[in-house]
Image (cartoon, grey):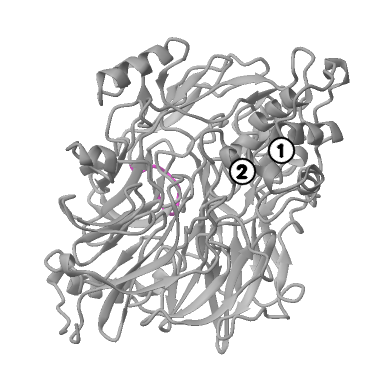
Amino acid sequence: MPIQVSSGALAALCLVARVGATTGTGSFREWQVYGGDFAGTKYSALGQINRTNVHQLKPVWIYRCDDMRRQPASTIECNPIVVDEVMFLTTPGLKVVALDAATGRSRWVFDPWNGRGGRGVNRGVTYWSSGEDRRIFFVAGAYLCAINDANGQLISTFGRSGRVDLREGLDRDVFYLSVAATSPGIVYKDLLILGSVVGEGPNPAAPGHIRAFDARTGERRWIFHTIPHPGEYGYETWPSNAWKTVGGANCWGGMTMDERRGLVFAGTGSPSYDHWGGNRAGQNLFANCVLALKADTGERLWHFQVVHHDLWDYDIPCPPNLVTVTHGGRTMDAVAQVTKVGHLFLLDRESGKPLFPVEEQSVPGSDVPGEQSWPTQPFPVKPPPFAQQRFTAAELTDLSPAARAFALEKLKTMRTGSVFTPTGRQPSVALPQFNGGGEWGGGAFDPLTHLFYVNASNEAEWISMAPSTPQTDVTAVELGTMIFGAVCSACHGFEKANNPAAPSFTTLKTVKERLTKQQVLELLETGRNQMPSFATFSAMEKRAVVAFLFEETGGDRISIRDLKLSWAEEIPFVATGHHEFRDPDGFPVNKRPWGTLTAMDLDRGEIRWQVPLGTYRALEAKGVSPTGTFNIGGPLVTAGGLVFIGAAMDERFHAFDKATGKLLWEFQLDAGGYATPATYEINGRQHVIIAAGGGGKPETQPGNAYYCFALPGPDS
């Protein structure tokens, strides 16, 4: 088939030729970096697949992984990279696979688990080369691995026999705490710069400091303390000893790089504990911040905090996008940061100053004893929010009278209002919920039009706070129920898992069919894969969790005089968990759309269009127009005039007209595409690939496939 290049694609080729030195890709025809390029644009100058022919797309190969799990359901969140016609991806069981990018045939498999199977999530790998030395960096559990890209073997001269223990080198003893990474690091010269995933409390958690490692040896070259140490900028925004005890403030969503300026950009998460901060009074820099660091030293150039003293788990979930816009009649390099609450902050790349005004608006104060919530939060005047930010009776569902009546009755005992309503003893409704709004998929930027594309979820949840210590004597099961709600439900949830790496509460209730009580006690002590160790739990706490999971009956009551919970003195109030808020038929109780794809004009700070993303098939069968659904995974924009995205719970891969938002094509996958797609060209043929791993936070059926699409070839 002859290659057809549109005028837009030709302009894109010229643009890539002009700025290619700063994109971090050796060729626009490949996808060598997580997110497409060092700027994280998720943009491709390829235009062979375009508005006029996208309806002809068909799978040209499907790669099926051999380690999918049904209980607990696995997922795939990986954005594959393509380097010199080789694709590198990760599997549901957290192996690394190298494929021939043209055919999908396997070249090698790296299994860090030695056949035992890994659990958790991973969003991709990092490629680095220097002459003939070509490496793939990948994090498995607490270990950063360096892999030979030609044969999939560990490089023995890196770290200890090819691995670096991420629990070391944090300037604090965290041996019994969880430190991992789910998003790939980014390279600068001979450095690998890496964020982390750490605990969220209320039990102890590691700090989320950002580190750079020598790409050859694994030696730590620099560290940036996201919870400042004495004498460092921002130290005064915490209590004096917080640097010794408080965790979190971690960059878990990945980073971007301006190679020309030598700057690395990161977004950080909330401090630990997420929902009560009386022990961390203050603004809490550099939690919930956009950070610009000098890539060679880790020195802070600037920061911008998007949430002060976070009490909602409103992490920055994704890398900042590096964009170029026209502002005030000038072309300016900027940073566009998506947030969980549905804000997009547009900041000057060199100074961090907002390009559009940002107002500090008063928000309600917390009524939880000991809490000192921050009185204001930042709201950008432009662009407008891309997600719903208010929930009251006026925003209740209109899907049916019965659904509305059900929700109205529930609201009688709940606190409602706008975003940043604090959690309290009375149940309160959060919209966006802690999953967003925006999520780890982030946005895609078109350098030709300066349009920015971002997907969002609009589903309410409810949450409440309770004392850490029981107020009366309790049974072991009652104590275990409380501990599960305070600690374990952050990942395992109640109705469904909040962390794709964790089995849901429903699955955990069957643990007694698979493990003995002693085995569960040992698992709490040691942890496994991305499940942290709970060695800091007392023996009583561990026994109580086992009693809860095994649904024990009877037993003596534990006197409150004998209760000494491991975190209660430090964290006297804990959340009861993140609770879904749905109608009796399982649909969200707030008004539609429940999921959206939005195009924003960054030059003007305006929404160009917004459409529902996905639909519930049960409602579709009744003739209900697309409602949008909860969605996970980001967009891809191309010079062919298209936005590709999976993400939605209808388990379809979609292509939208990037100018209008019109749905042009969709393909029914066999499991949800909860990942960000990639595109590349081989032998004159453009391909588009997406992982169909299902499962995850949406808890649809799991999948094991990567679908690779292309237009019909000459032999078709």
Most foreground residue, 645 or 24: 645
Q: Please say if 472 is above or below 397.
A: above
- Answer whether residue 354 is magenta in the image: yes
Most foreground residue, 537 or 622: 622
**Hey, what amino acid is under mark 2?**
Ala
- The furthest residue to the right: 562
Q: Position of residue 264 (x, y in %)?
A: 52, 59
Crowd class of label 1 (few under 14; some 14 to 19; many from 20; radius 10 Å): many
Q: Dot 1 corresponds to which residue?
A: 246
Q: Please say if 28 is above or below 690.
A: below
Q: Residue at x 64, y 39 (%)?
A: 200
Q: Dot 2 corresponds to which residue?
A: 249
- In this rendering, would 170 be left or right of 667? right
Q: Residue at x 18, y 50 (%)?
A: 661
Magenta segment? 348-355
- In this rendering, would 227 be left or right of 355? right
**Hey, what amino acid is under mark 1?**
Val
Q: Position of residue 87 (x, y in %)?
A: 44, 76
Most foreground residue, 673 or 49: 673
